[in-house]
Structures are given as C-alpha cells and as structure tokens.
Image (cartoon, coloured by chain):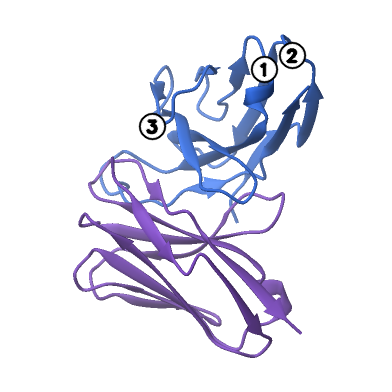
Chain colours: A blue, B purple
C-alpha cells in the first residue's frame, strides 16, 4: 500500500488568492509528480522531480510552481488563483531513477479538488 | 507527443459478465500500467507489465503486454458492482521517461 498524502482534499478560494497544495510521501521515493485532471478526464503531467532540488515542467503548461527541498515533500503553489485553475490535482511518486528502478510504477495520492470562484 | 488510445470509451455491463478493454499506442512501449479510479479519489495501481507477451493476474483481473509492444489488454472476470469506475492505462516508451496516460474507459455495472 502506497503512503502518499495530499492536503487539503477540497479547497474553495476566491480569485487572486495564493494557495499551496501539499503532498508528502513516506516511502523514500525519489521521483514525484503533479498531475492535473478535470473530472473523469485524462491526467496531464504539470510538474515532476527526480529528487531534492530537482524540478521540471511537464507536458501541460501550468502557471503553478513546485519545490523539492526534502525528499518526502513536493508542494505545488499557485501565486494568484483563477477560475481556469479549477480542477483536481493529483500527486504521485515512484522509485528511481536509480539503476534497476527505471520501471517503477506511480503511486497516487487521493487528490485535491480545487475550486476557484 | 506520445498518445494512447483506449477502447471502449465507456461500457455498460450486467453484473457477472466478463469485461475486456484495451489500450493502443503508435509507439513501442517498454512498460504498461493499469489503474482504476473511483470518483473523487486518486488512481490505484491494478497491474504492472514489463515484458512483451507478459500475462499477469490480480484476482479477477488479468492484463497482457501485447507482443507488438504497442498495446495492452485488461480483462475483468465476473464483474461486481464495485468494479465501477474509470480504468486508465499508462505506458512508457523509454527507461527514465515519464508515463503517458490514456483517456480512460468508464465502466458501469448494472445489477
């Protein structure tokens, strides 16, 4: 069973607010990811990290930023939320990319459902 | 970029029936993953496949890594109501590359 936690589960905020979505994992995984998903739709990778002090942009352009100061923690920040940011945000982690761990599957948290009014 | 197609997009079946869905790619993949997502939850890993031709089971679920390495199949036997959800496939075409996700197959089970 994967141990990856996201808070808050639900968040409703007004336009222009700064928010940080939290993600923590207790498995010691090096790789962590953020996906954006509209309800019932496909997942889009917005950020990922290979390890501490490593962050990369994903396939989908996003106005959010991430940081990776500790292995277990990968927060996502929106400096100024807009209604177009309304979506579900899923955090995931996997082992690797050390030798022998290239094929490790992703383990997901339960997501944060964000609504910007 | 890499794209995955899943079929069918949605399906309605009777409880007790078997289910079959597939995932195809225009590129050769070296890893296939199958996930199930319940409403409001994160995807949960069902089966991981690492070798062409590999057939792996997890309870009533069986998945296969296509021999061409461009497709994968997921079968569910004797469906039950809790099988309802969205099933996503994900594939990776190179070591160290990120996974690409399909658009999902929505499964409804009628009592």
Between discs 1 and 2, the one toward the N terminus? 2
- Asked which quadrant contains residue A30, the reply is top left
Label number found at residue A59 = 3
Mark 3: few, some, or many residues within 10 Å (few <14, many ≥20)?
Answer: some
Q: Are marks 1 and 2 in contact (CB under 8 Å)?
A: yes
Q: Residue at x 61, y 70 (%)?
A: B107
User: Disc 3 on helix, strand or loop?
Assistant: loop
SS class, disc 1: loop
Q: Residues within 10 Å of mark 2 (few under 14, many from 20)?
A: some
Mark 1–mark 3 CB contact (< 8 Å)? no
Please name the residue shown 38% across and 51% down the image.
A104
The residues tagged by marks 1 and 3 sit, at their Cα atoms, a distance apart of: 20 Å
Q: Which residue is mark 2?
A: A15
Percent coordinates x, y for residue B23 in the rendering: 37, 65
Residue identifier under label 1: A82
Q: Position of residue A41 (x, y in %)?
A: 56, 48
């Amino acid at each position: 069973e994967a141990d990856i936690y996201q808070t808050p589960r639900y968040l409703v905020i007004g336009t222009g607010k700064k928010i940080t979505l939290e993600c923590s994992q207790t498995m010691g995984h090096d790789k962590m990811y953020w996906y954006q998903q509209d309800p019932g739709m496909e997942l889009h990778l917005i950020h990922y990290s290979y390890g501490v002090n490593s962050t990369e942009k994903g396939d989908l352009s996003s106005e959010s930023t991430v940081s990776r100061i500790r292995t277990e923690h990968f927060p996502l920040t929106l400096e100024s939320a807009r209604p177009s940011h309304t979506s579900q945000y899923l955090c995931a982690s996997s082992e690797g990319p050390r030798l022998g761990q290239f094929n490790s599957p992703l383990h997901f948290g339960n997501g944060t459902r964000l609504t910007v009014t | 970029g890499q794209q995955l197609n899943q079929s069918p997009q949605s399906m309605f079946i009777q409880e007790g029936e078997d289910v079959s869905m597939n995932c195809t790619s225009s590129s050769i993949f070296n890893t296939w993953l199958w996930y199930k997502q319940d409403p409001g939850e994160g995807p949960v890993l069902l089966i991981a496949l690492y070798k062409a031709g590999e057939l792996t089971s997890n309870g009533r679920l069986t998945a296969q890594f296509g021999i061409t390495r461009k497709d994968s199949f997921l079968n569910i036997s004797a469906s039950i109501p809790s099988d309802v959800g969205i099933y996503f496939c994900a594939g990776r075409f190179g070591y160290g590359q990120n996974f690409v996700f399909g658009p999902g197959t929505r499964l409804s089970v009628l009592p």
